Amino acid sequence: MCGKLLTMAICLRIRKRTEQFLEEKFVWKVLYQLSVALHVCHSTLQQCQVLHRDIKPANVFLDENNNVKLGDFGLARVLNWDESHSNTIVGTPYLYESGK
């Protein structure tokens, strides 16, 4: 579908330029694999959980088999299990300011 270590942002840009829709099966695969990646970050680490805090197409990578790789943990926060949430507001400034 897209492959070769592209980000979802580039994949979507290419599809938009060529006026091609993403296949529904591909969209569900991406959503499922992204949810699994987030589940691993949030619940399966032994001493802590990781909050990514910047999920967007530019941070979702696709390998040559269109498998999802979650990247750019620059804004991530590690919480101990006794912490229930983070009080800081973070994210991509443009997306945050425009309300998108």
Image: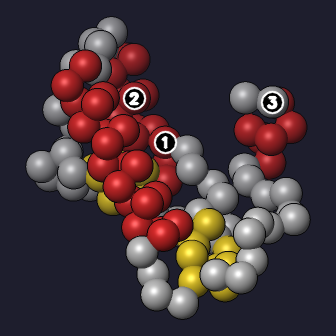
Q: What is the C-alpha distance between the residues marked 1 and 3?
A: 16 Å
Judged by depth in the image, the label closer to the viewer, 3 or 2, is 3
| Cβ atoms at labels 1 and 3 below 8 Å apart | no
Disc assigned to residue 57:
1
Residue type, label 3 = Gly
Residue nearer the viewer, 9 or 40: 40
Q: State the residue position of label 3.
A: 99
Confirm whether residue 33 shows in the render: yes
- As drawn, 40 above or below 34: below
> In the depicted view, which residue is nearer to us: 89 or 49?
49
| 3 or 2: tag closer to the N-terminus | 2
Which residue bears the numbered disc 2? 12
| Towards the viewer: 18 or 22 | 22
Name the residue at the top extreme: 19
The kind of residue tagged 1 is Pro
Q: x and y percent of residue 9 in the render?
A: 45, 38
Seen in the picture, residue 66 relative to 46 is either above or below; the reply is: above
Q: Tell me how far mark 1 sits from mark 2, CA to CA.
A: 8 Å
**Quick one: SS at disc 1?**
helix
SS at badge 2: helix
Q: Is residue 62 left or right of residue 55?
A: left
Which is more N-terminal, label 3 or label 1? 1
Residue 42 at x, y = what percent? 52, 67
